[in-house]
Amino acid sequence: MEQLGPTDPRQVGPYILMGRLGAGGMGAVYLGRSAGGRSVAVKVIRPELAEDGAFRARFRHEVAAAGRVSGAFTASVVDADTEAATPWMATAFVVGVPLQRAVTTHGPLPEETVRTLAAGLAEALDEVHRAGLIHRDLKPANVMLALDGPHVIDFGISRAADGTGLTTTGSVIGSAPYMSPEQAMGAQLGPASDVFSLGSTLAYAALGAHLFGDGAGAAVLFRVVNTEPDLSGLPHGIRHLVTACLAKNPAHRPTPRQLVELVERIGRPAGEGGWLPQAVAADVLGVRQLLIALPKAPPLPPVPPELPPGAAPQGAGSGRRPGRRAVLLGVGGVLAAAGAAGAVALLGDRGGAAGAGGTPAAGASGTPVPLVRPSGADVAEAKPLWQVTQASPSAQVLCADGVTVCVSLQHIWGVDDSGRTKWTLDDITAGGVFAIDPNTPCLVARADGGRLYIPVGTGSLGPGAGVLGAVKVAGTQLLSITLADGKIDWKAPLEQTNTTGEAFFAGIRDGKAYLLGAGDGKDHGILPTGSHVWAVDLAARRTLWFHGEDTLMVQSALLPGGDRLMVTNFDELRALDATGAVAWSRKLMAFGIAAAGGYFLAPDVQGTVTAVDPKDGGPAWTLGGVVIPSLRGGGLATGEDGKVVYFLGKDTDGGVSLATVDPANGRTGWRAPLPLDDPEAKFLGARLLYADGTVYRMGPDAVLWALDPANGKPRWKYSGLKGQDPTRLAWAAGAGRLCVSDTATETVTALPAKGA
C-alpha cells in the first residue's frame, strides 16, 4: 500500500482515503473508510479518462457487472457514483493478499491449498455465470487469498454471457497468459472461457510460472491456441483437474459446479489448521492487524511490492533492488513478518552455495581428495527427555538452568527438567501480549543472569488532533521475570511516542538489552512508520538510548566485547555506536548477519560471507561457497570462545558439508561431508546452533543432527519431527539440552545434549 501523494484525492463520496492499493489502466484503487468505520476498496477513474465517453461507459458497465455478483467468493459492490465528475466505485475490502504476490514472495502453493483454491474459484465463477456474466480476466492478480478462502475481484472487462457489452466479436481484451483459445482468437465467448482461465491460474499457483510461457503477447497467444502445455510438474492430485479445464474445445471443459464436485471427490484438507500456508497466512494476518490498528483518517505508510532480490516489478525496467515492506502496525509482529517475507525471497536462489564448497579439498600434492560422504543410517537415534503438548503454539523456546521457557501469544510457561509445568505467566498479568504471530518462530525474549527479559505491547492506536492529525503511540514495556518462579521483577517502559512495539530481541551485552521495533518515534502526521532500536540499561531499569529510522531494520548483530550494534534492512548495513548514533553505513545485501572474532559477518544471496570491520564498515575478508541462511536465520554458528565459526558448504554431489572458518582472519579449517538429506525435502538453507560442546543442525526434512565440533562427525540424530515443516520449528540449545517447539502441532520436545 502506498502513501497518498499530492495529487491523490483525500476523500471520495463518503469515504476518507487511507492509502493507495494499486493502479491500472482505468485509474487507481484506494483503501477507504466510512464514518462508521467500514473499510472498502475504492476505484477512482483517472481524471483525463473521466471526460472520455467510452471510458465512462465502460466504467458504468463494470459497476453494473460487479453489482450483479454477490457470492461468498467475490467482492461485492457497496457504493458507486458513475456520473460524478470523477466516477468511482466502492467494493467490500477483502482482507487478503493477491495470489500473484503470494506466489512471487513465497513460491508455489502446496497441493492441498491449490485444491481449496480450485473449489473457491469455481464457486465464485458459478456465481458470476449465474448472474449472466463472463469475467474474462480471471488471473492471479485478480484473486485475493483470505483466511476464509479465495475471492475474485475486478470485473473491469466482464461482459454479459449473451454477448452484449462494450466489445464485439473480433476484439481481444484480457491478459495473454490466462486467455482461453477462443478469447485469443477474438471469437464469441461463453462461460467456458473463464474455466480455461481458471485452469491456467491454478497451474500458476502450483508451479509458480505461466503455463504458456512468457514473452511477447502474440507469442503467448499463439501457444495458447496451438500448443498443449507441459503439465508434468503439477501434483498428481490436481493434474487431471487442470487438464480438464484446459481443453481446447470449450464444450469439453467442465462447468464450475462440476469442478467443485470433483474437488470434493478428491478431498479437501481439514479446515481446522487453515487452508493457507503459514507464511501466506502471516501476511494476511498483517493486513488484518493493519485494519484493526488504523485510525479514522490518516493515510497509510508506503508498502512497496515484495519481490525476490534482483527481480524487477511487472512492467518495470531492469532495477535490481528488492522491494521492502514498510511497517504495517501491531505489537512487533509485522516487522518480524517483513523479515520473514524478505528471507523467503532470499532463499529462492539456490545457486549461491558454490565457490569454496563446490570442489573437494585438495591433498598435500594438490590432487583433489575424493568426497567420502557418511551414511546417516548407522547414526544413533536420540531419546527425548520429554515431550509436552501445550494449549497454544510457542513461537520461542529458551533453555536455562532447571527450566525451559516457552513463549506463546498469551502465555509463558516454565517447564522443569521432567517436562512438568513449573510456572505460568499470562498476558493479563504481564499487561500485554508477548508475540504477535504464534505460528511464526521468532526471538522475542532473552535469558540472562537468572532472569527472562521480554517486551510486551500494551498500548493502542488513536488519532491525534484532526482527521489527518498525528498518531501518538507509546505502549511497550520490557519485563524482567525471575526464571525460578515466573514472577515479574520489574518493568521498564518505552516512553517514546510514534512507536508500535518491539518485534525482535537483538540480545544482551554488558548489562544492556537491545530490541528492534516498529515506528521511528517521529511525528510524520500519519501512522508510525519506519523502525527503531531501543537500548535498555538493565541495572538502572530505564532507556539508555533510542534510535529511529524511516527504513525497515529487520535484523541485527551484537559484537561481543565491543560497543557497536549492526542492523540491516536486507540491502544496507548500518552500525550504531554506544550512544545510538550511526557510526557508518554500507550498501550490502545481507541476511542472517552475525558477529565473531572482532568482526560483523554478513552473508549475501550468492553464498559469500563478508567480514565487516566494526570501526568503518570496510571488508576484512570474504568467504565463498557458504549455504545461505534458512528462513529463520542461523546460517552461522559461533563456538563458545568466539574463535571458530561453523557454516555449511555445498558439495559437488548435491550434499553439504560442515566446515569451519577463523573469524579473525577468514582462514578455513576442516570440512566434513554430512549425510545426504531427503531428496524430496524442500530447500531450507543453513540452520545451525552451537551449545554444550555440540553443533546442532536442522535438516530440510526436520531431522535434527548433533555434530562433533572437533571434526563434524554425527553424534546422534532425532527423527521424531521428520516430515514437519522446519520453518514452523522454533529451537534453542543450552543447559545440556536441545529444545524444539513445533508451532503446527503445539508440542515442545527436549533432547539431551548427549543424545542418550
Image (cartoon, rainbow, N blue to C red):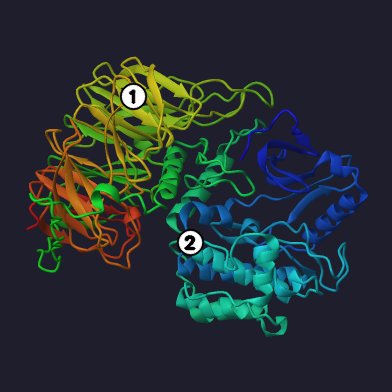
Work out whether 285 lies above or below 428.
below
Q: Which residue is mark 1?
A: 617
Judged left or right of residue 299, residue 715 is left
Judged left or right of residue 167, residue 249 is left
Residue 660, labelled with which disc? none
In the rendered image, residue 311, in percent from the top left (x then y), is placed at 52, 47
Please, what secondary structure does the residue beneath circle 1 have?
A: loop
Residue ID at (17%, 32%): 450
In the rendered image, residue 618, in percent from the top left (x then y), is placed at 32, 25
Residue 733 seen anywhere in this rendered image of the structure: no
In the rendered image, residue 501, in percent from the top left (x then y), is placed at 44, 31
Decide: few, some or many residues near mark 1? Use Cα within 10 Å; few <14, some 14-19, many ≥20: many
Q: Which residue is mark 2?
A: 108
Q: Disc 1 marks which amino acid? A: Gly
Work out whether 313 lies above or below 520.
below
Work out whether 457 lies above or below 318.
above
